[in-house]
Image (spheres, grey):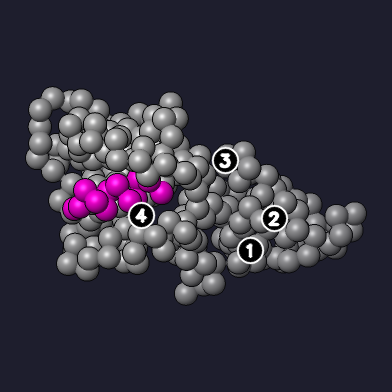
Amino acid sequence: MSDWVEALVDLKGHGVPVALVTVIRVDGSTPRDLGAKMLVTLEGRHSGSIGGGKLELLAIEDAQAALRKGEACVQRYPLCIRAGQCCGGNSEVLIEVLNAGPLLYLFGAGHVGQALCHVLRGTTFTVHLVDPRPEWLDDPALPKAVVKHSEPWRAFVTDAEWSTRVYAAVLTHSHDLDREIVADLVTREAAFLGLIGSKTKWVRFQSMLKKDGVSKAQLERIHCPIGLDLGHGKAPKEVAISIAAQLLQMAQA
């Protein structure tokens, strides 16, 4: 397995945006042939190679720029003495932006959580499913693209990325656990924070969270009940569809 493939698997598992640089055309003498690939992160770390030297340095810079813009592009590099290489040919590369879509941190691998993983399969979201219960997290029916986290929620939250591309949904099996997680997440940067439950649960939770020191402004960030109002369906799949609809709506806003 190529080192860039191994790196891509690892980066995808951690939700790190990365640019895939592929040689798509060569003219004359070039250091690498068609199909040579290299991965580049926003910080400039790279795996694989498209030829080294000035060519590779320029491609890394262009890959970082593509990541900042979030757009794919094609670049052509003349391999002449002026450019620092004397091969005499030309290399053209395609730079694709991967793993740059929204992240969903899904707390709770129960019936609704699993249904939501299935509903979101094939969408722009990369789903990170957090639950220390192996009997739920290790369900073989879960989509393979779901990134599973068996550690306690606090450990996951501490190490996870928190930014405007992060969406969080709290759907655990315990009201007390829901409250603990939401009280922590509301202090972190995220585009969306949703909590499963009824309107009655939310009234009770607001009172308890205020006692925990959560401010009015922070409470207003929490979407509870989570999901769009699509009717009175309460089956896990129906609830999951309403949540997915809200997440996709928010991500496209």
Q: Along the line of sight, which residue is nearer the eye, 233 or 94?
A: 233
Is there a contact, CB below 8 Å, between mark 2 and mark 1?
Answer: yes
* Element marked by disc 2: helix
Is there a contact, CB below 8 Å, between mark 4 and mark 2?
Answer: no
CA distance for labels 4 and 3: 21 Å
Residue 12 screen position, x and y as percent: 45, 58
Residue occupying the point 70% across, 54% down: 59
Q: Which residue is mark 4?
A: 128
Mark sitting earlier along the chain (4/3): 3
Residue occupying the point 78% across, 65% down: 53
Q: Is residue 21 left or right of residue 245?
A: right
User: Which numbered tag is attached to residue 66?
Assistant: none
Mark sitting earlier along the chain (1/4): 1
Q: Which stretch is magenta?
A: 173-184
Q: Is residue 72 left or right of residue 159?
A: right
Q: Is residue 37 left or right of residue 209?
A: right
Mark 2 Cα-neighbour bin, 10 Å: few <14, some 14–19, many ≥20: many
Under mark 4, the amino acid is: His
* Element marked by disc 3: loop
Q: Along the line of sight, which residue is nearer the eye, 215 or 231?
A: 215
Q: Residue furthest bottom?
A: 1
CA distance for labels 2 and 3: 15 Å
Residue 203 within the segment the image draws in magenta: no
Q: Which residue is mark 2?
A: 60
CA distance for labels 1 and 4: 24 Å
* Element marked by disc 1: strand
Q: Which residue is mark 1?
A: 46
Residue occupying the point 23% across, 40% down: 196
**SS majority, magenta:** helix
